[in-house]
Image (cartoon, rainbow, N blue to C red):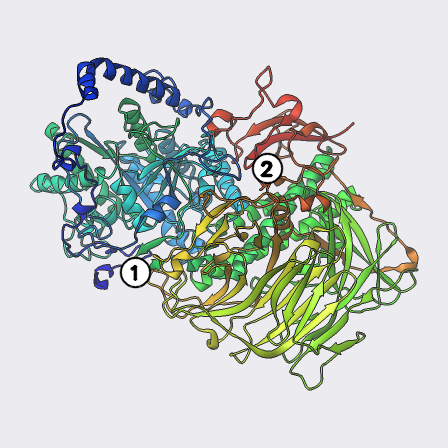
Amino acid sequence: MPFSSYIGNTRRSSTSGVGGGSGSGWGHSLLPTALSKSKLAINRKPRKRTVVMNFLFANFFVIALVISLLFFFLTLFHFGVPGPFSSRFLTSRSNRIVKPRKNIYRRPLNDSNSGGAVVDITTKDLYDRIEFLDVDGGPWKQGWRVTYKGDEWDKEKLKIFVVPHSHNDPGWKLTVEEYYQRQSRHILDTIVETLSKDSRRKFIWEEMSYLERWWRDASPNKQEALTNLVKNGQLEIVGGGWVMNDEANSHYFAIIEQIAEGNMWLNDTIGVIPKNSWAIDPFGYSSTMAYLLRRMGFENMLIQRTHYELKKDLALHKNLEYIWRQSWDAMETTDIFVHMMPFYSYDIPHTCGPEPAVCCQFDFARMQGFKYELCPWGKHPVETTQENVQERALKLLDQYRKKSSLYRTNTLLIPLGDDFRYISIDEAEAQFRNYQLLFDHINSNPSLNAEAKFGTLEDYFRTLREEADRVNYSLPGEVGSGQVVGFPSLSGDFFTYADRQQDYWSGYYVSRPFFKAVDRVLEHTLRGAEIMMSFVLGYCHRIQCEKFPTSFSYKLTAARRNLALFQHHDGVTGTAKDYVVQDYGTRMHTSLQDLQIFMSKAIEVLLGIRHEKDKSDQSPSFFEAEQVRSKYDARPVHKPIAAREGNSHTVILFNPSEQTREEVVTVVVNRAEISVLDSNWTCVPSQIAPEVQHDNTKLFTGRHRLYWKASIPALGLRTYYIANGNVECEKATQSKLKYASEFDQFPCPAPYSCSKLDSDVTEIQNEHQTLVFDVKNGLLRKIVHRNGSETVVGEEIGMYSSPESGAYLFKPNGEAQPIVQPGGHIVTSEGLLVQEVFSYPKTRYEKSPLSHKTRLYTGGNTLQDLVVEIEYHVELLGKDFNDQELIVRYKTDVDNKKVFYSDLNGFQMSRRETYDKIPLQGNYYPMPSLAFIQGSNGQRFSVHSRQSLGVASLREGWLEIMLDRRLVRDDGRGLGQGVMDNRAMTVVFHLLVESNISQSDHTSNPNPRNPSLLSHLVGAHLNYPINTFIAKKPQDISVRGPQYGSFAPLAKPLPCDLHIVNFKVPRPSKYSQQSEEDKPRFALILNRRAWDSAYCHKGRRANCTSVANEPVNFSDMFKDLAATKVKPTSLNLLQEDMEILGYDDQEPTRDGSSPREGRVSISPMEIRAYKLELRPHK
């Protein structure tokens, strides 16, 4: 296929995209053909009739009747008794979602892990079946020559909904504020003005970040006009999130936050709740999104950017509209209806039908006189007149009919828009005026069997469901769904996206990894601040003490919105211009600082230090965060404690987990001769070690890391003291150092003792495992377990050479090559609590792009003792690394058969398989937080991450993760630059090797595996680290005060498979205006994790007391706080009808109000939200 046919506008979806060119009519060979049995049997010789044959002919009708009755009863048994043949959609919209078929429980086909979904299509089946040949389909390059007979609409006319839209990126080539000032505000003004002129005109809008900004500027008249357009159905808010979020890198916490932030603002301001989701631009789609939307009360979804070969296969079988079901869901409670757009892009040339050269002629904003480029196919749009309307209408209708033939129903969706369209009245009028003339012509000719009009997504989906109620489009044997009959059910996700040829969008899984890490830090900091805010307000029931937390509500809202903004599909993806990335980064940095200041003050309130007269937001706090960032793109550094003789420093630890944390914690100090004491001034054993850094000329900073084992109550606080001087405690024990180094004289730091490593291997160990390292290269070689068994884990640092890669695309030139050479520096540090190997490897570059620390903990009965912690310091800085992509690869002896598992949004796992028929870059997948491989003997090797990256298993036993990429060129998707703004950063992995206790062959099992309970806890501790705060001023040791003690808000730790996603006051600024008697002011969101019971519960010994087999009881969850008015709600906190949300396990009370006695049951994998009121016990 000539590349020239792709050339066009330099947008992400290049306009000429996949149109143009001519091809042979090969497409017909792909259409399913039904060979009749008579043809197949044509050459058989006739046989003599036997006695049996005579009997059959004599009793033909009796036998046929018996078989028919049998088939009838089997059908009844399988599908149940059909409901009445009437349309449920003629009733009000709120009643539209029918209850899932709870009486049906289909046995899972083959899932040893747990009960799984039964569906018609899985994305794994599609990948197994499709050959990925990229055959040229002619005018529709990635499809075939679409034809139709013409009588398809005789019984049911074609109902065409043309949906005007404008795609507004909240940041990409310009910042969100620049886009607003230059484009988005004019677009919203235009919509209000042009729709108000004619009630037949419709429009949809997605991003609340822009609508909220416009609302602040708009006059009351404009606000009222927009509200009226929404209320009368001309303007539909679709999705209604703060942004249209990315689905590969975003964590589910942030996705819930960003949708809830947008939906709540919309409901508070205009009084509507969106029901239809519109996601035309994320680069691939996650099934997590389908789950979250369903649990927010959404009924329908629209998606666009999926692999072009998958689109073609689904289109061939008329499966582009389907019911998306979660892989674990045997009860059909997660079903949501999906419309997948069939063509290359969401622009007008690729949305009216399969021939972009024709469709482009109906983008009337490309006529002469507008700013948009002309059609690259040579034929341009012309004004519609009475003279040409018949010819133009028939040409357009031909495309509509061809597109309609790819779908089952005769209801057709035609999006009409593009990036930042409808910016002027003239442009909008050109589209509305011309299309209305075309519609009038089509509608006035009954022989055309078509009706065309402007519509919203709601108009389309409502009409489609009404048609599906009247006409049964189900195929024989199709599982389908009780939600909407007539469509196949599907499970799986849509990664990795390819838009053409070998162009796989797996680069953005890793682009700008520094900010992907900041995103997650802001996320867990925001969650911590929300929890503290809830407790501060929960324990306070006097107006005076509400002032401090409610005065912070403006900054809390800003933090929620800054996190939400970065979830945009050009934010967390790392695919915006450098200065736009700086804008996102600055916003996140500002919010991080605000949240840390709030938390440091909230600590004082919760520990009873801050008195009411001080409780304003303005008075400074006694504490500050122990980790600080000097600016938006600086790595966090530990604030060193200057432990002078005779002084003590207070350290407060906050545990954001639902269980007690026993954990080795660390702070940085300036002196080595110090001690640690707990809140009762009891001595705590501790260890001191020299701080190392990524600098081969100066390995040691001169400061020290102080370690001790802390115990912090669930969601609580605990105080410790760092003392230097007259306390009757042993000083921190010094680590023993060993080294192998290219230095002539090793610079042993005082006051430590150093000895030389004199063998080729070195080891560190704890009671669970021994790590063996190759001294020459400074790399991990194997893990020896307590029982003597070994797991080979050959660590390798490699580099891809990728001159064609860019911000979006990963296009390597061959395989990654190892870069580590013998030499470099290796320092081992062994002590009471932490054993560490630091390696600054020698590489083929003058300055190594990476150094790493590998740690084992010996805290005794801590979760940390079971993991291997590796911290990579990455610096892909300077021209030596241009067009290079850095990976770490673990080459294990696990026989995984090239099957591995990676997570989707930190919520669920997805089974991945490496295919030879697609290129290396297509076998890379998103890894927001976890990937693992598993062998036939049940051994599992997992890598947990605290930021999103890309992962692959390219050969047997390999797991490789990309760490950073530096790329000179633009990859032709519209950004107009490479990725050269790399920052020094730290990536932390927790490695876990587990053996199962019940064996099964997992590689042939098509369903995803769940992490073990231990693995869930390891991931939670990594992603929700303990927050450390230190006193700004030291105290005199002799005074021994004040004793701050601890704060333990939970009556007992929650079960270990129950995770508090968030505990918040949704509307803090309105808190004081509402009384306890009003609606509940607090919200608690819980997730019950599903875990693989084939793995032993090692985690139970480490701070894990129970699992959530019993209902959760809100009434005794908190100590000293009563939880009342507990009400289940949707994940966006706006819907209270559980049936709409698909939940099937509610225990309604006699009066139909809240769950019985505040007790709630949560099924594994479910996320549940509750509204409640808190007040102190009398």
Amino acid residing under circle 2: Arg
- Which x, y percent locates residue 438? 16, 38
In the image, which disc is placed on residue 777? none
Q: Which residue is most to the left? A: 387
Q: Quadrant of the C terminus?
A: top right
- Which x, y percent locates residue 313? 28, 45
Element class at badge 2:
strand
Q: Which residue is mark 2?
A: 1088
| Residue 806 or residue 518, whichever sits in front | 806
- Disc 2 crowd rating (10 Å Cα; few below 14, some 14-19, many 20+) is many
- Which x, y percent locates residue 1055? 67, 37
- Which x, y percent locates residue 809? 38, 61
| Residue located 55% across and 70% down the image | 875
Left or right of 1152 on screen, residue 203: left
Q: Which of label 2 and label 1 is nearer to you? A: 2
Q: Give the spatial CA distance, label 2 vs label 1.
A: 45 Å
Amino acid residing under circle 1: Thr
* Residue 2 appears in the rendering: yes
Left or right of 6 on screen, residue 231: right
Q: Quadrant of residue 240?
A: top left
| Residue located 13% across and 26% down the image | 48
| Residue 954 or residue 268, whichever sits in front | 954
* Residue 629 appears in the rendering: no
Left or right of 9 on screen, residue 628: right
| Residue located 44% across and 42% down the image | 287
Q: Which residue is mark 1?
A: 10
| Residue located 37% across and 49% down the image | 281
Count of marks, rendered view: 2
Q: Earlier in the sequence, mark 2 or mark 1?
A: 1
